[in-house]
Image (cartoon, rainbow, N blue to C red):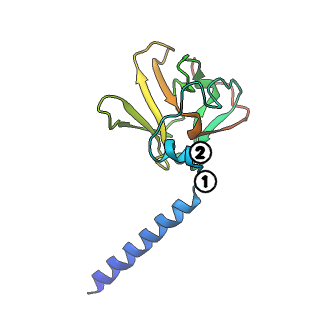
Amino acid sequence: MKAIYLLIITLFISVNMNAQDSTKYNKLTPAEERVIVYKGTEAPFSGEYYLLDKEGVYRCKRCNAPLYKSSDKFDAHCGWPSFDDAIKGAVLRKPDADGHRTEIVCAKCGAHLGHVFEGEHFTKKNTRHCVNSVSLIFEPVKLPTDTTGK
Ligand SMILES: [Zn+2]
């Protein structure tokens, strides 16, 4: 009997914690929700960050986790912000529901970001994270010089 009580209490606590977590997320507009929650795609060449060429970090629109650095951004002429790398551990890859592409999501909150493509030879890393601007918030910050090995 004691074990059952314990189980109920544990379940109650974990449900409660999940509820609290979701209230920590930023409020999204319907257009942002369409992409971030329902895995939509913004129109090409329409996003505010497509041609942005400033130094800084791109964060998740929903949970603020840092996802991409401006030093990994490049212009793939595809109409969406493109990065050839993500901040380590920040982005997860999943098979897309369409059966052939690879979806990318925020590792922290699961927000839909876009798709990742390999083997296109745009950059040395041969990888293109094709990300919806609407999934991102740009934060202008000075990046440490270094590191990317480009
Ligand atoms: Zn997130």
Residue at position x 50%, y 44% in the image: 34
Q: Which quarter shows the N terminus?
A: bottom left
Residue 26, numbered circle = 1
Tell me, yes or no, whether the two marked residues, 1 and 2, touch with CB atoms within 8 Å: yes
Counting from the top left corner in percent of width and height, residue 129 is at: 49, 28
Q: Look at label 2 and name its amino acid.
A: Lys
Tell me which amino acid carries mark 1: Asn
For disc 2, does the CB lie below 8 Å from ligand 1?
Answer: yes
Residue 111 picture location, percent across and down: 49, 45
Give whichever of discs 1 and 2 has the lower sequence position: 1
- Secondary structure beneath dot 1 equals loop
109 to 71, vertically: above or below: below
Q: Secondary structure at mark 2?
A: loop
Who is closer to the viewer here, 5 or 133? Answer: 133
Residue at mark 1 to residue at mark 2: CA–CA distance: 7 Å
| Numbered circle sitting on residue 61 | 2
Q: Quadrant of residue 48?
A: top right
